[in-house]
Amino acid sequence: MPPPDSPVELDLPSKPLRQRTWYRTSVIVAILLAFGAVRLPIELRLNEEHRAAYFHGAKLNLSLRQQIGQLGFLAALGGFRALVADGLWIQAHIDWTRTQWGKMLFLFNNVTALQPRNVMFWDVAAWHMAWNASAYVLNDASEPHIALRLKRQHEYFIIGKDLLERGIANNPDRFKLYESLGNLLRDKLDDHLNASINFAKAAKFADSPTYEYRFSAYELSHAPGHEREAYEELRRLYLEGDKERLPTLCSRLKYLQEMLNIPASQRINIPDSMLPPSQHSNGSGPPPSPAQQLLNGIIPAAPQVNIPYKPSPHP
Amino acid sequence: MEPTVNHTFFSPARIWAIATNTLLELFRLKVFYFLLIFALLLIGSSAFMIDFNFQEQFQLLKDVSLGSMSIFTWLLAVLATAMLLPKDIEDRTLYTILAKPVPRFEYLVGKLLGILLLLLIATLLMSTIFVIALYGREQIAIADAIRGNANAPDQLQSALKDIHDSTFTWSLLPGIIIIYIKAALFAALTLFISTFASSTIFTIMVSVAIYFIGHLQGIARDYWLGSATTGPLPRIFLALVALIFPDLQLFNLVDDIVAGNSISFILFAKTAALGGLYTCIYLLVAYSVFASKEL
């Protein structure tokens, strides 16, 4: 033991504490920067691979920030995009019950911007616009002019179509939106050729239902100038067997055989029992679509009395 | 003659002892009470779903469940890790452990392993609750479909297929694993911060800030590498952000997976490996600080 009066020898480090702290901090920052430099190309490549696999497709820009608010935008940036989108979706659902179509469209645009890979959002949003909103404005008693009602109705059809087209651009690897666009073009816009093209696109996917191809042929049979192609397709489907010999297919095939004056020897004999019940007694084509009836003046362009709007369930 | 004890430089048994002890400590803090909140959240969210069709219901349930799992695992990783070192210093446990022949590296690895075990148990429990909730809703949807399509067997089959496709699929599993990996990364990062932090609250604040910066790192990187920014100072700033902070967007895959995106095994493995690399690097950096820390 040293004598009590002698100075205590401490094993102090040679460098002052502050200098050592700076040195240590610099070393750690250097390690982090070096690791950053190493991982940068890895991250860039991985990011590209993620994008190629349709990840990180949401466009979180200033426009969206203004629309969903700072907190929502922060949550979306912080990795909770799906939750923010769901919140907006629930809000849009509430607005549906209040028939606030403009606000719904605003919310749908935000939801789909946040979750562009969610097919259901695109599909249901388009359905709300093209089916519900369009029906509502057609029955809107506050608008006395039928022409303006029809114009607004058509605008909602186009909005629905636009939603589906944007949905397809974000989800080109899935069949569902092609099918929905085909339905919309067929039922609302009377554009049978493009409906057929979209059903055919849907049919190309391995996981799509078998009716897509049939639907494509049906719509082609309604497209002026494409009757011969439609006939060939329907005939080919009919000859595939009983599974394809459905009433609509038989009806369209029979109609086209007569329309194209197919020689009797080449015709397929389709018994009445295979046709839809409404066509058992005559061999003419199926009744015109509601849109055609509207154009022909068979049904009134707009109801005479105001029918209260009732939301219909999504198919 | 005294028996000689071979003291190994690296002992998995010692690490395991520290890890299990850490886990036990955290259990005693009743951290798993958050699972009650998680379960209530799932049940409560069902109240919003009555008017939706079954596809929307499943979508919302999956989003709420996996979003909550992300939040809870991240919070657990940050809060539990942030208090580890300060608590050990306060209780003097740290001095007792380090007075024994336990290298500081083993101490840190043991602590991190304890947290990773906690996160693993939490993720498994939350996944179980999620699957049960999803199964319950699936049964309700199936019963509705059978009632609605009793006379149309074709439509019933199609409806049942749609229901089955909308519920739990194995494609969700990589998303759940990525949630865990992201939380593990954050545990290591928080451990690193806590080695030089002056207080627990400082550690938590810095970790939360890094969480948000990390999600913007990709934007900073793109601006830095692109030609949009011209000034040298903004470029240096963006470069520092891109090089120092982790790119957390790379671990945000679950939103798109729930939306139906499938991830290939290779891509998943690469993402998981990057998460593992981050965790290891942050652990090493934490050790480099902790090794020379004056206690």
Image (cartoon, coloured by chain):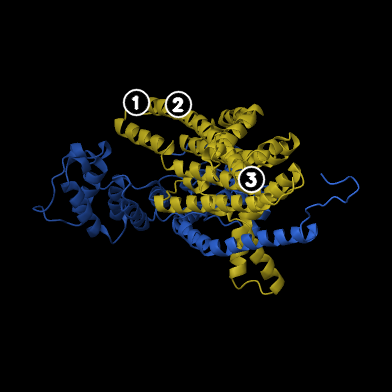
Chain colours: A blue, B yellow
Pick whichever of labels 2 and 1 is earlier in the sequence.
2
**Up-down relation of residue A120 to residue A62 (above or below):** above
Q: Nearer the viewer, mark 3 or mark 1?
A: 3
Q: Pointers 2 and 3 in contact (CB under 8 A)?
A: no
Pick whichever of labels 3 and 1 is earlier in the sequence.
3
Q: Pointers 3 and 1 in contact (CB under 8 A)?
A: no
In the image, is A270 to the left or to the right of A123? Answer: left
Q: Is there one chain holding both mark 2 and mark 1?
A: yes
Chain containing mark 3? B
**Residue A93 makes an appearance in the image:** no
User: What whole-number distance in Å separates the C-alpha atoms at marks 2 and 1?
Assistant: 15 Å
User: What whole-number distance in Å separates the C-alpha atoms at marks 3 and 1?
Assistant: 68 Å
Q: Secondary structure at mark 2?
A: helix
From the top left corner, tell me how far across and down residue B36 is, in percent: 61, 27
**Up-down relation of residue A266 to residue B133 (above or below):** below
**Residue B229 makes an appearance in the image:** yes
Q: Badge 3: few (under 14), some or many (20 or more) residues near its Cα, within 10 Å? A: some
Q: Badge 1: few (under 14), some or many (20 or more) residues near its Cα, within 10 Å? A: few
Looking at the picture, which amino acid does disc 2 mark? Ile
Q: Is there one chain holding both mark 2 and mark 3?
A: yes
Pick whichever of labels 2 and 3 is earlier in the sequence.
3
Which residue is pictured at 47% across the width and 46% down the height? B257
Looking at the picture, which amino acid does disc 1 mark? Ala
Looking at the picture, which amino acid does disc 3 mark? Arg
Q: Which residue is mark 1?
A: B150
Q: Which residue is mark 3?
A: B104
Q: In this orientation, which residue lies closer to the viewer: B207 or B199? A: B199
The quadrant the C terminus of chain B occupies is top right
Q: Which residue is mark 2?
A: B140
